[in-house]
Amino acid sequence: MTATEQDAAATSSRRSSVLVAAGILLSRISGLIRQAAFGHFLGAGLVADAFTTALRIPNLLQNLLGEGVLSASFIPVYARLLEEGDEEEAGRVAGAIAGMLALVSSIIVLVGVVFAGPITDLFAWGLSSERRDLTVRLVRIMTPGVGVLVLSAWCLGVLNSHRQFFLSYVAPVLWNVAQIAALVAFGLTGTTGEDLATVLAWAMVAGSVLQFGVQLPAVRGLVPHLRLSLDRRRESVRKVVRAFVPIVSGRGVVQLMAYVDLAIASFLAFGAIAVLGFAQTLYLLPISLFGMAVAAAELPELSRAKAAEREHLAARINAGLARIAFFVVGSVLVFVFLGDLLVEALFGYGQFGDDAVRAVHLVLVGYCLGLVGNTSSRLYQSALYGSGEARLPAIAAGVRVGVSAVFGALLMFQLDRVVLVPGGGFELIGDLPAFGPLDKTLRETTEARHLGAVGLAIAAGMSAWIETAILRRRLEADLERDLKPGGGQLGRTVGAAVVAVPVAFLTRALFGGWPAIPGALAAIGVTGGVYVTVAAGIGVGEARDLLQVAQRRVEQVLARVGVGSETDGEILATKAGGPPADEQQGDAPEQDAHEEGQVRTQPDESGDLGDDQQDDGQHDQ
């Protein structure tokens, strides 16, 4: 690959990353609003625990048959047929896979509805009778909705293969909007507690249908030869199935191990599962926006590169790691030092009290211990998938989840005996060390906020580095090249964050007395601005690019109001080291993308109580 081709590929990849990230951003913003409404009307107590658990249990179906599995099995085969110009065969393959997914999903949904009680007992055996009964009822309602989400993931795979990225990633907004509408409409009319949770479960099913339905017309338009079938005779279909089965098997082990976290979390004091869910909503933002967007855009290019192009592959991976590190380290800075302000601004209303704000922040800090590693591992996974290696990512994830479960159980029993007290202090209940749960009566009746969930978060954060190390060592061996942490920019990026820490404390003092939302925005904005400026000053490329984009936008606004001109903006942008303004819009010519023959696949979003939200369990769009 020539230097010109590499530049074109990088430009197209960056453009696709922007489209993926834009869709995910809108989806995550709507998810934050949904979670804020959830906290306002249902709080972080018994009912919230039951709903969060009920959503996690059937989501096993989506994680086994949906997103990540399709990325590694169906999409490469389908995309290759498109590039070869065989649209008729591609349509038949897409129809066969859709038919098989629909059949298998329907069978599993039927089993989930009929046997909701035993399944709940299997995955969350520590729930009290009251929490358990509500969870079973909600599982029966929500399981069909998760089955529809499997077909939505199939739509996403087809759309991405046709380079239609935005619709597939913004569609989950409807999933969130349906639930927001139900919470507001029924919550404001006086519906509360279990009744409101039941309404919300039905809204989740409706949102799943909307998410699938909004993508289906575009899929039908792009695939004129689509025919639903169960035909496994075609070689292309058999190729997908051959890749599908081992990937599902590998992910099945990971998923089952991940549900150990849910099981042990059910032994924690009331509200712990809900607190974990709120913390994961924030924790997943940088993973989705930066890790998954970069990984999704890089996977096709990494897949197309030849094995002999090791230097090129290593360079792309290191560039992606640098891009991820800059944004994720900044996220850690905000979560750790300003996280309580952020949590209060988003969730601190109605039934969501100050103790819940403090607990969610502490859990978020625990997760931050592994945020850089967890996000970087997404790119490593894409590189391995691109080379045809699907087993090792599943094995590495299984090791991570197993270590997280063991150490999480040990830590959570200790910290579940620590409770928050008004005024910012802590109080110890019982003796340490502890090797079992609190008395069941104490766990279910106390109004104090226990910190057992923090133990699970710490273990999850630390274990993420184990997975990252396994994947990185394998890639370095395959490429015979070093893959540097943070793409070689981690030291500078962390240095910029350290410089910004005193600013974070200063902004807390200055804006802490403001109303929650403007105070959090001001504190995060000032601290983030210092972080980006310092990073740019010490040579972090992503920071320089970000400042150039900001400068260009300002120049364009000034030009529109008559303060400057487009020509002035071009001259200034060129002096700043970038191309003219019209060449920096992030919109590479469409023909470049087609000439590169690139295909985008879906990021593998995740979620479990010891990880991120969709790979391992909870569907949080």
Image (tube, rainbow, N blue to C red):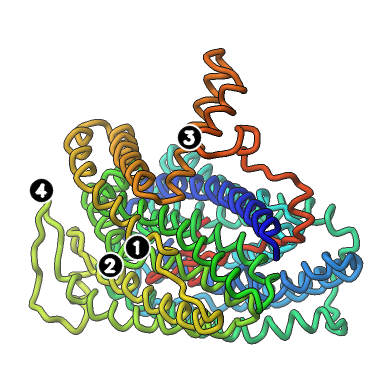
Residue 349 can be seen in this image: no
The disc placed on residue 542 is none
Q: CA distance from mark 3 to mark 2?
A: 39 Å
Cβ–Cβ below 8 Å for labels 1 and 4? no
- The residue depicted at 34 percent of the width and 49 percent of the height is 538
Within 10 Å of disc 1 (Cα), the crowding (few <14, some 14-19, many 20+) is: many
- Labels 3 and 4: the sequence-earlier one: 4
- Labels 1 and 2: the sequence-earlier one: 1
Residue 180 at what x, y percent from top left?
50, 45
> Quarter of the image holding residue 459?
bottom left
Q: Which residue is mark 3?
A: 550
- Labels 3 and 2: the sequence-earlier one: 2
Cβ–Cβ below 8 Å for labels 3 and 4? no
Horizontal arrangement in the rendering, residue 533 relative to residue 559 (left or right): left
Q: Which residue is mark 2?
A: 453
Cβ–Cβ below 8 Å for labels 1 and 3? no
> Mark 3 or mark 4, which is nearer to you?
3
Q: Amino acid at mark 4?
A: Gly
Q: Which residue is mark 1?
A: 276
Q: CA distance from mark 1 to mark 4?
A: 22 Å
Seen from the viewer's position, the closer of residues 256 and 510 is: 510
Cβ–Cβ below 8 Å for labels 1 and 2? yes
Q: Secondary structure at mark 3?
A: helix
Cβ–Cβ below 8 Å for labels 4 and 2? no
Q: CA distance from mark 3 to mark 4?
A: 41 Å
> Mark 1 or mark 3, which is nearer to you?
3
- The residue depicted at 66 percent of the width and 49 percent of the height is 166
